[in-house]
Amino acid sequence: MEHQVTKTMDTSFHEPDDHASPPWYRSTRYWISFVGSFGIVNTFLQRGDLSMAIVCMVNHTAVDILKYGISINENLSLFTNASRDVHESSAITNISYTTIVERDTNVTEEVSFHDSCDSKIVDARMREDGELIWDKETQGLVLGGLFWGYMSLQIFCSFIIQRWGSRKVVAIGMFFMSVLTLLTPVTAWWSPWAVLVLRAIIGAFNGFTINGIFALWGKWAPPTERSRLICIMYSGTMSATALVFPVSAFLCKLNFAGGWPTVFYFYGVVGICWTFMWIYSVYDDPAHHPRIHQKERKYIQESLGKSEKKGVQLQIPTPWRAIFTSLPFLGIVSAHVTYNFGLFLMMSNLPTYMMEVLRFDIQSNGVYSLIPYLAMLLAILLGSLFADTLIEKHILSVNYTRKLMTVLGHLIPGILLIILSYLDCSQKDIAVVLLTLIIGLSGLAYCGLFVNFYDIAPVFATKIMSVSNAISMMPGILAPYVVAEVTKDKTREQWQIVFFLTAGLLGLGTVVYLILGQGHVQKWAVIREIPEEEKALPS
């Protein structure tokens, strides 16, 4: 009969003395974390590029003309010099509308009416009209296209990563994603439906990079550094979201390659360059890295409980039934889904909200969209140190630490969203402060529920993360479409509905996670080791 030895991951491992591993600033694992963070930056830049570019690639004036039936003669006070080229058959196929605003003393009062917060028409000076005639519904569908592809291949990604390893999968994902990003302007000129398909394919490769980078930490992250390493990597999410708005706004204003196409060209080239950096810097585990210090390799392997004895094999069949019936896992998924609804709402629609309700122009839009995500980046970095300290000093258990960070990053932003929904363009400063707090505090959730996958199932963390990612991508599809349907008239009251819905979902996800969440390794995630010499013995 086979003799089986049961073994659990030791999450109480303490930092060894300085001789056991090089300091963090010379360690390979932290370098990989920073490289991975830069990779997340590239991934999310290419995920969010369309959200900002769509503000300056769509002809919003023409869309309003088609929607509200506004004629030039009725709006001479707002558009004093205009040229219009309309080609109509059974449907309008092209509108070129160029606006040059010249304020005149005779029309000051009427222009000021259009500048009011209650007006459906935005001052033309605040518009960055492009050449594409995409209505709100089309914009919502195109913005959600990436998540169709991202969601569809999540579980498949985990099998590919297991077979090929993170290094190859991430390199392939980033390279092809970047090439397709370069092709976005061509498909946009052709058809919005072509962009929808292209974005879905980009989303599939996007999933390869996210899951592949995440999968590394099962073999690279010592338990007591788990929050730090994973949160440093995830900080790239916020760095990208902070950068994508002002950088895209700047590229839109450039008189190069048509303005908005430059956004996609720039991010595509950067992504291709990063691919080569990844191939050089990263290996799937410490044992195969040619440049890692021997002491660091030993430290990581010992801290993860890896046996160096020859002939030891791991029997780790994936217990899918136990996973899908695990209450702690379902609690994480519930919080993940609701969190993503709020995150994708902001990532996909924040520039649109700031244009339609707060009435920021494209340049101010990019600058003020940057501030909240810088706060989120800071919250992730400080929150990871805070969470690790609570656990290392035994101030709170792993379970209560994860739940505390989730409450701070989940529930409180939901409450602040309700307050934000009552503000309009006459209270811009207060609105920016609230947006900064909402998005900034939400970064603390990364140190809670997202690290929790490794707490409950270190061996299966990549697989259960892939499953959770697949399910939680639904908000990425739904959020832009819901916003497009609810905010057709671009009013504060319509955006208020969106914010109340989001706050309710965040509250629900928090409650479910507090009830079901756990911080220890589950029984179905226990590692079983069988020595090879005993494996051959007859039963």
Image (cartoon, grey):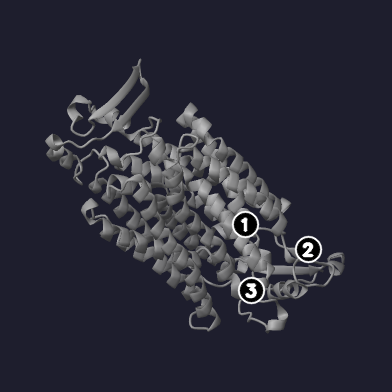
What's the residue at 69%, 67% (across, down)?
Answer: 28
Picture layout, residue 271 above or below residue 70: below
Disc 1 residue type?
Answer: Ile
Residue 68: % across, % down:
24, 30
Q: Residues within 10 Å of mark 3 (few under 14, many from 20)?
A: few
Foreground: disc 1 or disc 2:
2
Disc 2 residue type?
Answer: Pro
**Of helix, strand and loop, which one carries label 1?**
helix
Per the rendering, the mark at residue 290 is 2
Give residue 434's quadrant in the image: bottom left
Mark 1, residue position: 213
> Is residue 501 visible in this depiction of the protein?
yes
Residue projecting furthest to the top: 89
Decide which of 316, 427 is in the foreground and name it.
Answer: 427
- Disc 1 from disc 2: Cα separation: 19 Å
Answer left or right for 242 relative to 128: right
Per the rendering, the mark at residue 24 is 3
**Of helix, strand and loop, which one carries label 3?**
helix
Foreground: disc 1 or disc 3:
3
Give residue 334's quadrant in the image: bottom left
- Disc 2 from disc 3: Cα separation: 18 Å
Residue 489: % across, % down:
26, 39
Q: Earlier in the sequence, mark 1 or mark 3?
A: 3
Picture layout, residue 73 above or below residue 210: above
What's the residue at 64%, 76% (across, down)?
Answer: 10
Which quadrant of the rendered structure holds the N terminus? bottom right
